[in-house]
Every structure is written in structure tokens, then in C-alpha cells.
Image (cartoon, coloured by chain):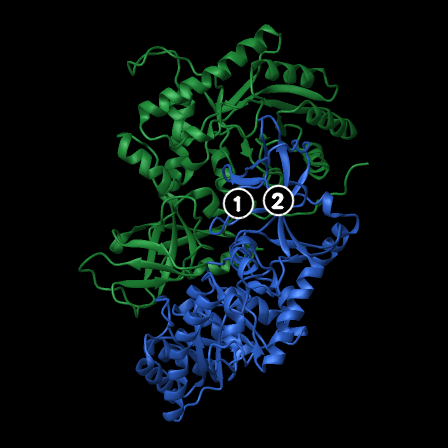
Chain colours: A green, B blue
Amino acid sequence: MTALFETAVRVGAASRTTIDTPALVLDLDRFEHNVATMARFCRDAGLALRPHAKTHKSSTVARRQIAAGAIGIACATIEEAEVMVAAGLPGVLLTSPLVSDGKIARLAALLRQAADVMVVADDAGNVARLDAAAARIGRRLGVLVDLDLGQKRVGVPGIAEGVALARAIAAADNLRFAGVQTYAGHLQHVAGHAERAAATRAALDSARALVAALGEAGLPPAIVTGGGTGTFRIDARGGDDETGEGAWTSPLTELQPGSYVVMDAEYADIQFAQDADWPFVPALTVQVTVISTHVPGQVTTDGGSKAFSLDGPVPRIVGPLAGGAYAFAGDEYGRVGLPPGVAPPPLGSRIECIVPHCDPTIALYDEMVVVRGDAVVAVWPIDARGRRALPRVPPLR
Amino acid sequence: MTALFETAVRVGAASRTTIDTPALVLDLDRFEHNVATMARFCRDAGLALRPHAKTHKSSTVARRQIAAGAIGIACATIEEAEVMVAAGLPGVLLTSPLVSDGKIARLAALLRQAADVMVVADDAGNVARLDAAAARIGRRLGVLVDLDLGQKRVGVPGIAEGVALARAIAAADNLRFAGVQTYAGHLQHVAGHAERAAATRAALDSARALVAALGEAGLPPAIVTGGGTGTFRIDARGGDDETGEGAWTSPLTELQPGSYVVMDAEYADIQFAQDADWPFVPALTVQVTVISTHVPGQVTTDGGSKAFSLDGPVPRIVGPLAGGAYAFAGDEYGRVGLPPGVAPPPLGSRIECIVPHCDPTIALYDEMVVVRGDAVVAVWPIDARGRRALPRVPPLR
């Protein structure tokens, strides 16, 4: 939708104060800090990094993560995977099961383009259908066993089921047993580092038990992938007791965090208050405009429930009106309650807010406006956000 | 993004059960019933109909509304207006103030393409800037005074301010005083027809007072636009007392409802329970797929907070699993709690849900899959959903 030529023309004369709102604004300095910090952390910890594209849905962001040292890109949807492969990015891992004919056909088409595409599974029937699809392509598909760490969402429920599924994958002619995925989404926002550490270690102990059982079964997993922004240090912990919590070794060989790259108000509430040396900084705001000023004590903006996701805290105002209370006033409007004694900003004033929850907020937009200071330096398409309901490739027969 | 050619190819072999999910599914029979019903209602009531595109953000839907008799299309954003004008649709009315330089420049560019584009305003300074922009184009822009009916969001707060603003518009060389807008968004979901009627009449009495005052000032408004799906019968009531509530005449000359065209669970909760002869039917579902079945008493779907808006009731399951409880399980997942005694549907089963709140749910998708019964008959692009942050036209100098 955003042609490169047009983007160049549009960026030409723009500054941060001439953006049409509501708009997603990415602070490039802060973004680059986050990208480099996580890459360095994983390098130092001896872990691979496969950042999750579900957060940003942008091949431009993914390319920068790869350039900083990531080995691949985790994707939640086939659309995300298609966009990343089309952009020439390596190591695409589908982190959700693909079970319908249409999606399996699209996965097979991807495998034809990129031999290193992998997918997770938690069901033997699904594994058989993945095998049949790979057979028609004539390529071997890497499949990971997805293990439920207690979120009760996806994944095999226990060690025995995990070993059985790994055996089924390894026995399939056209599949390759690639490893284990263990994601504890429900633990990312546990308040308090100690509580989060205890819960994460308990969960990852299940993963370690599966890894051990797979070893005994002659199927040691080459990849054990998981982890998230909220637990990244815990996920990576090696055999030490520097914290006084006792020696403990994470079973993970790689991390797949998403939110670290831009952060949000939801993470800020937990991390900044409690982890003194938290290394990631908020890099993403939604900019809105004051469009009406008639009501005493408040101003009305053009940012409502189509501009912000509703599943986090309210948008957190930064800048001159920080401390003002943001409230939604319908799909297209927001209200900012002014702090006591603060004069209402004039019509047309810009207000920027740290996004409530980054992933679903980004998914509302077609592009991010990239700034350094006040200058707009690029417009990055959120090219993996579309939901295409009909397959773009004919079903395989 | 969806070329016509590609759409035709994709629709070819598709049925309702081969859609890639999560997908927005529009039942064409039900949609056509809703479009025809509102058009007939307004014709019978002697009112003009200018349906609101904020609900569907689709020029294809808008074209069908116009074909059924609507005189124009209401738009909440400049993006929506640009798409509707580009599609050749008449009578575009911007129902929110446009205050920034970038948006006023885009409005002026639209006015150059379509002389009948109109906008609302609630501020004299904004009116002066609209006048200056129209002067540079050399065309007269129609501007309506937006009146706040108590929602405290946008609009002039009272009669005196409304008359003063109308005078400012009429006095501007390049503007035309086109009328009054009065939208009571906060009353659309008041439970109980009688309560909703009383609140709506009280609100519209303010609008009637403004209309009267404008008449006395020599500025009788040609258009008095407002109303919504929840109050459409009340908004339209003429000078009668058929309800036993006493004679009362609505000041509106036209209605601008949006949701009637597809309906949603939020409206269903209010209307179906309380308005026995409610004429509109739910026409829009989100289809999801069962992707994991390991947890007793539930199945996991591929529809989470990126597939449904979160500001209404939970998604309402229709079909075999109706009565199952839908819950969100993250951005990419949903959980369906199975009704007692119901066996879990197999992996890959499709589940359709009436959308919680139509407007922001539609805004999550790039297209609607249009079905008659089980056959996919079209894919309609949601072509006005994108948020473009930088102006597509250079600012006027």
C-alpha cells in the first residue's frame, strides 16, 4: 500500500509535529538501543535470539533484528511468515499450530521458497497432515513439539505426550524433529522479579524434564525455544547462584522475545517499578491531536478505540501534559483530563502517549512513522498486519 | 492491496469452510435485508439517509447503501472520506472536526475533486482556517455547526455558541453554512426503548432550540443531521402521538446511522431483548478455527485480541457450539469453554461468532469474506481502514 517512491516523497518535508494523527511514532534512537541491548544480552548469555514478529509485524524491524545478530524470526501467523520469507529473512519459525488445509498449503508453499521454515505442533493428526503436505513439495519440514507450561492454551500437556509426538515427527518421512517450544505467556507480566523468577523456573523445569526424556528416547532436541521480554533474564539463567537463589540452569537454547523492541505501558508498570536495572526503554508512542476544547477541565483528541488497543493500561501521556488522564470516548475520540492548574492546550496541539499494549496497538496501523528527535526519517510499513482470509495459493491436490 | 483480478481467482474455489481464519464473514442476504430496511424506513419517514462509513470503512458497502437510496456517506476520518470520494460516491460529510494543517490540506484536495464534500466545526478559529484553505482552492466549502448533545466530546456547548459559529461560517467568503450536526453517541446503547426515547428527546430538544434560534438569526439550517442505529425510530419521529408519549417532532432532516448495516452483540443485547419488532439482523461474524484440543472442557481457537475488538461483550458463538463461552487467551488465541455435555469439536473445526462491537472489529481486517449460505461470493476490501500518518498531498502554500 505504501510504495517506496511515495514514502520518500512524503518523508521529505515532514517533522514530528506535522504528522497526520492518530499515528504510531517510533523513536529510532530508543528502538536501536533496545535491538542492540537484547542482541548483546543473548550473545553474552550464549543463547540464540529469534525475536517474535507478532509484536511489530514489520519486515523492516525484523531485518534490523537479524542485522544485529538474531538467527531468525518467530511468527504467530502464516501472514507474518509469508511477509518475512518474501523479505528474504532467514529462520522463520511458526509458533502456533497450523491445522486447516488452507494454512498447511500456504506453509508448504513457504517451504518451497525457504527450506529453513519450521512450525510447532501439539497433535499427532496434525503432524501426519504436515508430513503429507511436505511430501507433495518434496522437502523436509522442521517441526517442533510445543509444550504447555501451564497456560492451558496450546501445547502437549505433559512429558509422555511430548515424547510420543517427537517420535511421530521423527518417524515421518518428510518431517524433521527440530526441537521443543515452551512459551509461558502467562508469566511475562507477573509482578515482582522474585515471584516471576520462581514461577518461570517452576514452569521451565517441565521443559527440562521433557528435554531429558527426549534425550533418553534418543531424540535430543537441537532447539529449545521460548522466553519472553518479561522473563528474559530468568529464561537465560545459566548454572550459577549469583542471585542467592541457588544454582539453576535454564533448558532454553534460544529466546523469542517480542515486546522488548518497543516496550509499552503494561511492561513499564511492572518492570520500571521493580527491576532497578531494566535495560529496555519505551520507543513507541501514539500521537493524537487536540480536536475540541469546549469542555472545562478536559480536551478531546482524535484517538479512541481504533487508535489504541484496549487490553492494557490506559495510554500514558508523555511530554507537557504528562500526568493528564487519558480516557476513551468512543472509537474515534479520546478525552484528556487536565492535571489541576494546567491550562488546556490549544486546538491542534499534539499529545504523545506510550502505547498501552504494544502488539495489538501496532496491529491497528499500516505504518510506523520513524523519528530521530523531531525529524521524520522514515515510514516503515507494518507489512505483516493484514488478515487475508482466502489463500493466495491454490490448495495442493 | 486486493487487486480485483486476484480476488476473482481467490473466490473461485472457496466455500465458507475453506476460509483462512480468523476472518470477517459477511452474510450477504442479511446485509441486503439491513440495507433495504433502513433505506425504506427513511423513505417512509421523509428523511434523508447518510449512513456512516466509520462502521464498515468499505467503499463497496457504501456504494450499495447509495444504490439503495442514501444521499451520501458520513465519514469519521479524512482517510474514509478520501476513499469514498475516490470511489465516486456523492455527499461525503466529515463528522469530526479537522484541525491540523495536514488534514485541512487533504480536505481542500478533496474539495477540488468533489464540490459537495462537507465538514463539521465547533470552533471559530478552525472555521477561519477552513475558509483560508477553501480560498486557495477557489471553491466554497459547506460547513455544519456541530452541537454537543451532552456527550461532552465535540460540538459547541450551547445555542448562543452555535448561532455565533453559524454566523462566522456564513460570513466567511469561501464557506457555506450547510446546517447542524447533533449526534448523541452516548444514548445509542441506553437499555430500554422508553428510557432511550426520553433521553433522546431531551437531547434533541437542544437541537430544535438551535434550529429555531438559527431561523430567527436568518440562518435556517438546510441540513440537520444526526441519529444512530440505537435511536433511529426516535430520531425520526414526526408530529404524532401514536406511542401515547405525546406529540413530538424530531428536528432532524437526515439520519447517519452506521451499525444497522451489520449489527453486533452489543446492540443485540439491548435491542433483541427489548424492542420486539427490531428490524435489523446480525450479518457479520468472525470465523475462527479450533487449533488445540488438549485441555479438558475447552478448545483453543486462533482468534484473540487481534481478531476481535475488546470494547463490547465477548464474541457470541453461533451454530453448533452456541452457548459455549468465548474468552480471550492473548493476542492470537481464544478459549471456548464447552457447554456441559458437549463433546469437543475436532481440530480444524470452524466456529463463527457475532462480533462484539462492529466498528472497531471491522477496522482490524483488510477484507470481508462475503457469503451466501456456504458459498463465498466475493471479497470486499475494507479499503478505508488504513491509517496514513503523513499527508499524501503536499501542504498547500
Q: Position of residue B364 (x, y in %)?
A: 54, 51
Q: Circle 1 is placed at which residue position?
A: B306
The answer to whether residue B97 is visible is: no
Type of the residue with mark 2: Pro
* Left/right of residue B19 with respect to residue A252 in the rendered view: right
Q: Quadrant of residue B36?
A: bottom right
Q: Position of residue A103 (x, y in %)?
A: 68, 37
Q: Position of residue A286 (x, y in %)?
A: 39, 52
Type of the residue with mark 1: Lys
Eyeballing the image, is A124 above or below B207? Answer: above
Q: Residues within 10 Å of mark 2 (few under 14, many from 20)?
A: many
The answer to whether residue B73 is visible is: yes
The chain letter under disc 2 is B
Q: Quadrant of residue B292?
A: top right
Q: In front: B141, or A123?
A: A123
View extreme (right): residue: A397
Badge 1 or badge 2: first in the primary sequence: 2
What mark, if any, has residue B98 been given in the picture? none
In the rendered image, which quarter contains the C terminus of chain B? bottom left
Q: Tell me the element at label 2.
A: loop
The chain letter under disc 1 is B
Q: Label 1 vs label 2: CA separation?
A: 9 Å
In the rendered image, which quarter contains the N terminus of chain B? bottom right
Q: Position of residue B9 (x, y in %)?
A: 77, 52
Q: Circle 2 is placed at which residue position?
A: B22
Q: In front: A267, or A17?
A: A267
Q: Residues within 10 Å of mark 1 (few under 14, many from 20)?
A: many
Mark 1 touching mark 2, by CB under 8 A? yes
Q: In front: B27, or A211?
A: B27
Eyeballing the image, is B46 above or below A195? Answer: below
Q: Residue at x 46, y 21 (%)?
A: A47
